[in-house]
Image (tube, helix red, strand yellow):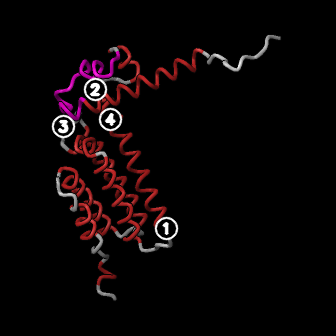
C-alpha cells in the first residue's frame, strides 16, 4: 500500500465547488457595487462580469440573470437582518425582559443598526429601482414581519399594524437620512406606543 502523503490533493469536485463558490461570491459583490453605483435599471450583465473578472457564461451558470442577482442580494441581506433581530430579541429575553414592546424595540434597534451598517445596500432596495415585481416581494416580506410581530404581541391586531407600518416607514427615512440620531429618535417614539387597554394604567 503506498504511503499516505500529508499533502493529499483534494478531489476535483471539491476544487470545482470551491472555485464555483468563489466565482458566485465575486459575482454577487460585483453586482452589489454595480447596482449601488448605477442603479438596477442602468446596470448590465456585462458591467457585472467585467467588475467580477468573470465570464458571462459563469454568471448564467450561477444566476438566471440580472434580476436573480438583485433578488439574491436582497434575500441574503434579509437573512442577515433576520439574524440580527433574532439575536437581539433572544438577548433581551435572556436578560429577563418580558415586556413585548421592550423586546420589539431591542429587535427594531438591531434591524435599524443593520440598515445603517449596510446603508448602501439598504438604500438600493428602498429606492424603488428594482426588477419588475420586486414591490410584491417587499410586500410579502412586510406581511411575514407583521405575522412575527403578531406572535410577539399576542395578536394585538391594530398595534401590530401600527408598529410594523411605522417601523417600515422609519427604515426608509433612517437609511436615506444623514442624521445619525434619527434612528434613536424613531425608536423612542415607537416605544411610547401601547395597546389601548394598557394606555390608561400606571
Rendered residue at 27%/60% (across/down): 167
Question: Residue 60, how many percent across, how many down?
Answer: 36, 18
The crowding category of the residue bearing disc 2, from other C-alpha atoms within 10 Å (few below 14, some 14 to 19, many at least 20), is many
Q: Residue furthest top?
A: 2
Disc marking residue 93: 1
Quarter of the rendering containing residue 169: bottom left
Place of residue 8 in the rendered image (x, y in percent of width and height, measured from the top left): 67, 18
Q: Is residue 126 magenta?
A: no
Q: Are marks 3 and 4 in contact (CB under 8 Å)?
A: no
Mark positioned earlier in the residue sequence (2 or 3): 2
3 vs 1, front mark: 1
Q: How far is the residue under mark 2 from the one under mark 3?
A: 13 Å
* Image position of 12 (left or right of 64): right
Nearest to N terminus: mark 3 or mark 4: 4
Q: Mark 2: which secondary structure?
A: helix
Q: Residue at x 43, y 60 (%)?
A: 88
In whole angstroms, how far apart are the C-alphas of marks 3 and 1? 38 Å
C-alpha distance separating marks 2 and 1: 41 Å
Q: Secondary structure at mark 4?
A: helix
Q: Which residues are magenta?
A: 34-54
Lower sequence index among marks 3 and 1: 1
Residue 66: mark in rendering: 2
> Can you tell which mark lies on residue 57?
none
Amino acid at each position: 500500500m503506498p504511503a499516505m502523503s500529508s499533502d493529499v490533493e483534494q478531489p476535483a469536485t471539491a476544487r470545482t465547488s470551491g472555485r464555483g463558490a468563489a466565482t458566485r461570491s465575486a459575482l454577487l459583490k460585483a453586482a452589489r457595487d454595480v447596482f449601488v453605483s448605477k442603479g438596477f435599471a442602468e446596470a448590465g450583465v456585462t458591467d457585472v462580469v467585467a467588475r467580477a473578472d468573470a465570464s458571462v457564461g459563469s454568471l448564467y451558470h450561477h444566476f438566471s440573470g440580472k434580476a436573480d442577482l438583485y433578488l439574491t442580494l436582497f434575500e441574503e441581506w434579509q437573512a442577515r437582518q433576520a439574524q440580527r433581530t433574532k439575536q437581539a430579541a433572544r438577548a433581551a429575553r435572556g436578560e429577563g425582559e418580558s415586556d413585548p414592546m421592550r423586546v420589539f424595540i431591542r429587535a427594531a434597534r438591531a434591524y435599524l443598526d443593520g440598515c445603517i451598517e449596510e446603508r448602501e445596500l439598504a438604500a438600493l432596495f428602498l429606492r424603488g429601482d428594482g426588477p419588475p415585481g420586486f414591490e410584491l416581494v417587499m410586500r410579502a416580506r412586510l406581511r411575514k414581519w407583521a405575522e412575527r410581530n403578531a406572535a410577539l404581541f399576542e395578536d394585538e391586531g391594530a398595534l401590530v399594524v401600527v408598529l410594523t407600518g411605522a417601523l417600515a416607514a422609519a427604515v426608509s427615512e433612517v437609511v436615506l437620512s444623514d442624521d445619525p440620531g434619527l434612528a434613536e429618535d424613531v425608536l423612542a417614539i415607537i416605544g411610547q406606543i401601547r395597546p389601548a387597554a394598557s394606555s390608561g394604567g400606571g
